[in-house]
Image (cartoon, helix red, strand yellow):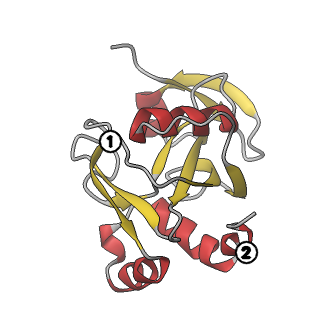
Amino acid sequence: MPEDIFDVVNERDEVIDAKPRSVVHAQGLLHRAVHVLVFNSRGEIFLQKRSMLKDRQPGVWDSSCSGHVDSGETYDETAVRELREEIGLVVKSPPQKLFKIDACEETDAEFVWVYRCENDGPFQLHPDEIETGDWFAPEFVTKWISEKPQEFATAFVLIWKLFSRKGAKTQKK
């Protein structure tokens, strides 16, 4: 299978090059990703446990779905694609944009747009990407992260902290 090609960006999130995934990660080059938080009608969030096959942070809990922006793709296009590929959720338009995080150590040198949508599932989990997934009350997630942050992807810990602070204000339209 051909290797994914990512846009390499500068500190202003402007595309300056394109490189294979392995090079981007090995050299710690700035690149782009999305995370989508999927809530059900009861207000619970769907979290995925990353597959042990993942090259980065395998076996930890993460956003409902997340993924790299491929070269030439927009953040919005990626959010729609990742929902379909990872959890089998087909949406007609991009989910609601909540906030953007600048590339940092926690995000593994990724600029990240965080999105939110509502869906009750059930989902079709991609076995190479996701070991399992489940619904959790937001208060439970907050407590779990505070007690066992090592059980979560580092980007999700940061996302949840920011979401709890500012994103929750925009979670219902």
Task: Choose the circle earlier in sequence order: 1 or 2.
Answer: 1
Mark 1 = which residue? Answer: 125
At x 52%, y 53%, the residue is 119
Q: Nearer the viewer, residue 134 or 40?
A: 40
- Mark 1 surroundings: few (<14), some (14-19) or many (≥20) residues within 10 A: some
The spot of residue 118 in percent (x, y) is 58, 56
The spot of residue 107 in percent (x, y) is 52, 55
The amino acid sitting under disc 2 is Lys
Rendered image: mark on residue 169: 2
At x 69%, y 36%, the residue is 93
The spot of residue 13 in percent (x, y) is 74, 42
The spot of residue 89 in percent (x, y) is 48, 39
- SS of the residue at dot 1? loop
At x 42%, y 60%, the residue is 46
- Quarter holding the N terminus is top left
The amino acid sitting under disc 1 is Leu
Rendered image: mark on residue 15: none
